[in-house]
Amino acid sequence: MNRHWLQVRGDPAVRSFVFQQQRVESLFDTHINELHAIVQQLLCMRGIYHAKIHYSSSQLTCWEYNDPCRYKVFVLDEVFHPNFLEQFGKVLSIERPIVPSPAIGKVLEVFKRLRYQDETIYLRNASINRINGIINVTFSCDGSHYIDYEAFYDTVDLLWTSANRNV
């Protein structure tokens, strides 16, 4: 089954308290442009085919093209260490990526917009998988969306509305 947009409602307990919370600035928030530049390099030049950014808890989870069965989790200052990217070899090409390199920055800009769009309903984490072309976003109301890359830009304006409506 080819799905262009799959929405999964999360924990009802989280949804019931969503309006009693608001986004708290994380380390990733304070360095979001630098973070996104690092993620873009990982996905476009360092052999990472799937990256998940946990904005709220300042974690970055990466899957390498040359070692796809293992993922690595990096936290807080590890990501911003001056030599962070050096641990990944230069891989200029991933075989048959669905998400092209020039699109990565545009997707990350949408993530930034969704993170800051509202203080109550906000992006908690997001991922890009270049090989299967799936973009995943999860909001503070615990609603997750899995969107085919080619449909992402057409549905992005509906994401926040959908997350807000399902609280």
Image: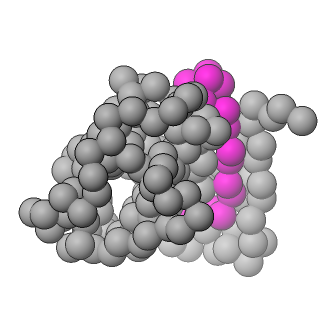
Q: Give the extent of the magenta segment.
A: 140-157
- Report the front residue among 32 and 87: 87
- Report the front residue among 12 and 88: 88
- Answer whether residue 142 is magenta in the image: yes
Q: Is residue 70 above or below residue 127?
A: below
1 with respect to 64 (left or right): right
Q: Residue at x 50, y 67 (%)?
A: 71
Q: Residue at x 24, y 63 (%)?
A: 87
Quarter of image, res 44: top left
Q: Residue at x 45, y 36 (%)?
A: 94
Q: Which residue, as the protein is rendered here, is positioned at the far left?
A: 82
Q: Quadrant of the C terminus?
A: bottom right
Q: Residue at x 65, y 25 (%)?
A: 151
Can the viewer see residue 32 in this picture? no
- Answer whether residue 120 is magenta in the image: no
Can the viewer see residue 108 in this picture? yes
Residue 21 percent across, percent down from the top left? 51, 72
Residue 110 percent across, percent down from the top left? 43, 36
6 with respect to 21 (left or right): right
Q: Is residue 7 above or below residue 20?
A: above
- Report the front residue among 88 and 54: 88
Residue 107 percent across, percent down from the top left? 44, 34
Residue 36 percent across, percent down from the top left? 29, 47
